[in-house]
Image (cartoon, helix red, strand yellow):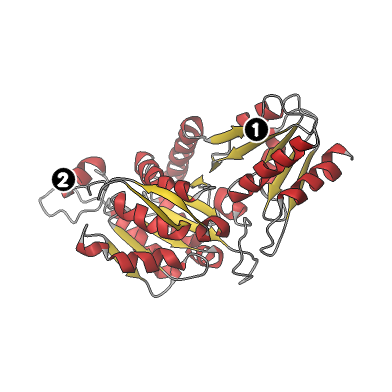
Amino acid sequence: MKEEIRLMKGNEAIAHAAIRYGCDGYFGYPITPQSEVLETLEELMPWETTGMVVLQAESEVAAINMVYGGAATGKCVMTSSSSPGVSLKQEGISYIAAASLPALILNVMRGGPGLGTIQPSQADYFQATKGGGHGDYHLIVLAPSTVQEMVDFVGLGFDLMFKYTNPVMILADGIVGQMMEKVQLPEQRPRRTEEEIRKQCPWAADGRKDGRKRNVITSLELESSKMEVINHQLQARYREIEKNETRWEEIGVEDADYLIVAFGTIARISDKARELAAEEGIKVGIVRPITLWPFPTEAVNKAARGKKGVLVVELNAGQMIEDVRLAVHDNLPVEHFGRLGGIIPSPEEVVTALKEKIINK
């Protein structure tokens, strides 16, 4: 398939991108607002064109363990779900992280806690960035704000997960999963041959019977001293990721008096608020973290220098604000504004919050 420009939903774009970036297997389970990922893959039938396996598992738990098995063989595999479904996957995600395996997980967030609502949310920030399962581990977390980034981050996620043998999560709010925009789909990336997989993933379990030592994939280690070594190896990898893979976007930061920090589609709403504020003579800059982990700590700190205050805008009760407050070294007010239950704030509300919480406080 050649490059192509299409109009489509974010969820549909994920499915097209998975095929075009050479995914070997998708294992998922339907849940609103991300069900179109699985539905689109079933409609496209990539098993007939690229050989990609698409399977609706019997549950979210089954799906993530199928990803675990596929990743253990060095295949390019992924899953997708929404907030309650990702909660069910947490044990498997922890196992995948401990076993140092490449896997891509999409979370199209909906409102909670509990079953909550099918409306959009950003309330899984803690779950994604702090390691929602047990143990000391990290996912690389990418936060798209456009449908084009939904496409691009599939390719980036595949590259990063193999580069660091570490799971990657695309943390998308329900807005970008359901919204339609023009996107440019990439040219078809050829799937790797078995020889290429063995070369790229020498650690993979490949069922070898030629006398060579078999690779055993596990997250279990009963000897404490060896488990400590594994943990130190993981932490060294995370430091390398923090050094090399932090990503963010800045808009109008240099000459601003105030700073807004927001991710995903809420950053787009905040950018419109920036324009409205400018009409009133209020100079506002935006920092949009693209990697939520590793968080762009130094970039936020640098952008906040010389400002009069920072407003963190999120579609939750206040989660990313903890990382922003840790990042901002100057004695500046750092306040939060968010809507809950799937209510999306307007740009006008963001401007009002900036005035009430920072400017006129």
Q: Would you say 311 lies left or right of 45 here? A: right
The residue furthest front is 279
Seen in the image, is 35 located left or right of residue 355?
A: left
Q: Is residue 179 visible?
A: yes
**Residue 217 seen in this snapshot:** no
Above or below, comparing residue 342 to residue 351 in the picture: below
Number of residues whose C-alpha sits closer than 10 Å to that of mark 1, classed few (under 14), some (14–19) or many (20 or more): many
Amino acid identity at mark 2: Glu
Q: Quadrant of residue 62?
A: bottom left
Residue placed under numbered mark 2 in the picture: 195
For the residues labelled 2 and 1, the Cα–Cα distance comes to 43 Å
Of residue 226 and residue 231, the one placed in the foreground of this image is 231
- Point out the frontmost of discs 2 and 1: 1
Position above or below: 84 against 337: below
Q: Which mark is residue 101?
A: none
Q: Label 1 amino acid?
A: Val
Given residues 63 and 144, the one toward you in this image is 144
Give percent across and percent down for residue 330: 76, 27
Tag 2 secondary structure: helix
Residue 3 screen position, x and y as percent: 30, 46
Q: What residue is shown with label 1?
A: 300
Q: Is residue 301 left or right of residue 99?
A: right
Q: Residue at x 43, y 46 (%)?
A: 153
